[in-house]
């Protein structure tokens, strides 16, 4: 029953909440999905997988810190393996690529203070700290971009599959997310010293996070004072981190040898790779394709940075462009790089939030349901047998026919955003439910990147287009 209410007084600048974001029916899907994910995680906690299960990466980090504390080199596989077995015994034999320490030496230094705790206690403390920092960062980001009532959606992001995968193995991605959001907020607030210090989180995973400081510097290229302060803070913080790591960790020079050997085994030994190059892994020319795609992605990131510098010399970049540029460049790199895991896609949450906020119609049931069905069919078609895949595709075809008029009426960016939400919710599920990876994981960064480009093509991409063309030529 509808109850009419007296008309409210007119306001000069009304800002009602976006209808799609306040839709309780759609939002209710998130805690339901989260409950299933948590149940799966609890099952694996009670019956841990000995090949690559709960706290697998945290075990490596703690072993590296323990070897370092006893004066050994974490890049010596025999010493590291013995420390791993003493921390948590594993009866099976793992590929060296899964149990080698290939991070910068500073990671062993910052993990060392937690050695005074028992292994599982340190793991739970690390998880709690990571979740708290990520929740705070997402809340600050939601408030900054004007997201109405973000509590449920923040909870959904923290319980989404990429987040749970990172928590399951004990990775630093949630801390990197918090640092990335802090960098962006400091950039928009005009605080280059804070932004430079926060951007030094690139030390945790330089192969993933390197586009962020580059593109933030490009945004500030038109202001030499801000740029110089950001560069000084970033250089000082990263320099201290590198110096402490290479000075305090015995045998730290072994990092380069370990890294070169590890890079040769990425395609064959690493699980749940989520970048576009993973699609070509079974093909004989996969290494060449991986290198080509990674170079193309890096080239596009550099091209975006140069275009921003060129455009900023004529006039300061618009607020939309400044906010979009670092996140879009990071999304392009995560889609193109040969070494990115599902948990690393946590770093795309701020960009996905921006895209959803600009396209609330993407969360309408008539738009989201066909996209969910299509994404689920793509996932299952890459895993199930051909007869089952054919039946699924037929079912999805019927659903799409039913919703075809709605999809045609929706704007392209709304459909792209619905697909981005769908892939983020559905594509990673086999990693937890089946303990396997699917070649369709690359759809997550691709769909989010496409939605971001379509959504911001007028306010952010269009002003950069002339500079992009001149820079490319």
Image: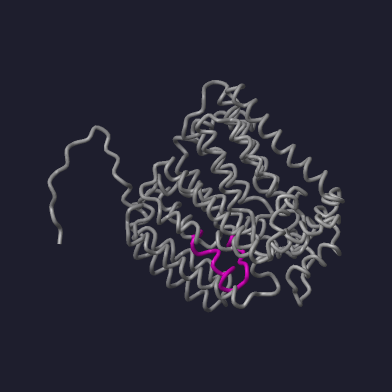
Q: Is residue 396 above or below residue 319?
A: below
Q: Is residue 252 above or below residue 9?
A: below
Q: Is residue 45 above or below residue 473?
A: below
Image quarter of the N terminus: bottom left
- Is residue 416 in sight in this rendering? yes
Q: Find residue 106 and report its horizontal and vertical position in percent.
A: 75, 47
Q: In this image, 339 relative to 249: left or right?
A: left
Q: Is residue 436 magenta?
A: yes
Place residue 27 in its image quadrant: bottom left
- Foreground pick, 121 / 45: 121
- Foreground pick, 365 / 142: 142
- Is residue 304 in sight in this rendering? no
Image quarter of the C terminus: top right
**Which colour scheme appears in the figure?**
one colour
Q: In this image, 246 relative to 3: left or right?
A: right
Place residue 91 in its image quadrant: bottom right
Q: Find residue 270 and report its horizontal and vertical position in percent.
A: 71, 63
Q: Is residue 265 magenta?
A: no
- Foreground pick, 285 / 273: 273
Q: Find residue 239 and report its horizontal and vertical position in percent.
A: 74, 37
Magenta highlight range = 423-441
Residue at the outermost front position: 116
Q: Is residue 250 above or below residue 304?
A: below
Residue found 57% across the figure and 70% down from its top: 432
Residue found 64% across the figure and 57% down from its top: 171
């Amino acid at each position: 029953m509808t109850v009419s209410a007296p008309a409210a007084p007119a306001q000069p600048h009304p800002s009602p909440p976006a209808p799609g974001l306040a839709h309780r029916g759609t939002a209710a899907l998130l805690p339901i999905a989260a409950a299933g994910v948590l149940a799966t995680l609890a099952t694996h906690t009670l019956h841990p997988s000995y090949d690559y299960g709960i706290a697998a990466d945290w075990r490596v980090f703690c072993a590296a810190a323990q070897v370092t504390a006893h004066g050994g080199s974490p890049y010596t596989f025999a010493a590291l393996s013995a420390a791993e077995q003493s921390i948590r015994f594993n009866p099976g034999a793992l590929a060296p690529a899964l149990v080698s320490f290939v991070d910068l030496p500073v990671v062993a230094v910052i993990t060392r203070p937690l050695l005074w705790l028992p292994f599982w206690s340190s793991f739970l403390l690390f998880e709690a700290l990571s979740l708290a920092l990520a929740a705070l960062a997402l809340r600050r980001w939601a408030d900054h971009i004007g997201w109405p009532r973000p509590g449920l959606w923040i909870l959904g992001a923290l319980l989404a599959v990429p987040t749970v995968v990172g928590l399951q193995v004990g990775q630093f991605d949630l801390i990197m997310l918090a640092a990335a959001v802090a960098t962006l907020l400091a950039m928009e607030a005009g605080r280059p010293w804070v932004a430079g210090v926060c951007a030094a989180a690139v030390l945790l995973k330089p192969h993933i996070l390197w586009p962020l400081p580059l593109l933030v510097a490009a945004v500030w290229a038109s202001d030499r004072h801000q740029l110089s302060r950001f560069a000084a803070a970033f250089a000082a913080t990263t320099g201290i981190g590198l110096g402490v790591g290479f000075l305090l960790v015995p045998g730290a020079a072994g990092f380069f040898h370990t890294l070169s050997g590890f890079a040769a085994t990425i395609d064959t030994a690493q699980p749940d790779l989520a970048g576009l190059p993973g699609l070509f892994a079974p093909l004989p020319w996969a290494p060449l394709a991986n290198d080509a795609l990674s170079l193309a992605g890096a080239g596009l990131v550099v091209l975006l940075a140069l275009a921003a510098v060129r455009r900023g010399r004529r006039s300061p970049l618009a607020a939309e462009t400044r906010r979009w540029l670092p996140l879009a460049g990071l999304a392009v790199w995560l889609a193109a790089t040969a070494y990115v895991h599902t948990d690393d896609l946590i770093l795309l949450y701020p960009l996905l939030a921006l895209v959803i906020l600009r396209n609330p119609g993407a969360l309408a049931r008539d738009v989201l349901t066909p996209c969910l069905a299509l994404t689920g069919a793509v996932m299952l078609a890459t895993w199930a047998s051909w007869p089952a895949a054919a039946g699924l595709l037929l079912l999805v075809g019927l659903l799409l026919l039913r919703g075809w008029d709605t999809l045609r009426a929706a704007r392209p960016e709304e459909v792209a955003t619905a697909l981005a939400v769908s892939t983020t919710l559905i594509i990673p599920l086999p990693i937890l439910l089946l303990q396997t990876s699917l070649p369709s994981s690359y759809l997550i960064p691709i769909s989010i990147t496409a939605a971001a480009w379509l959504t911001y093509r007028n306010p952010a991409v269009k002003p950069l287009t002339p500079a992009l063309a001149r820079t490319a030529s």
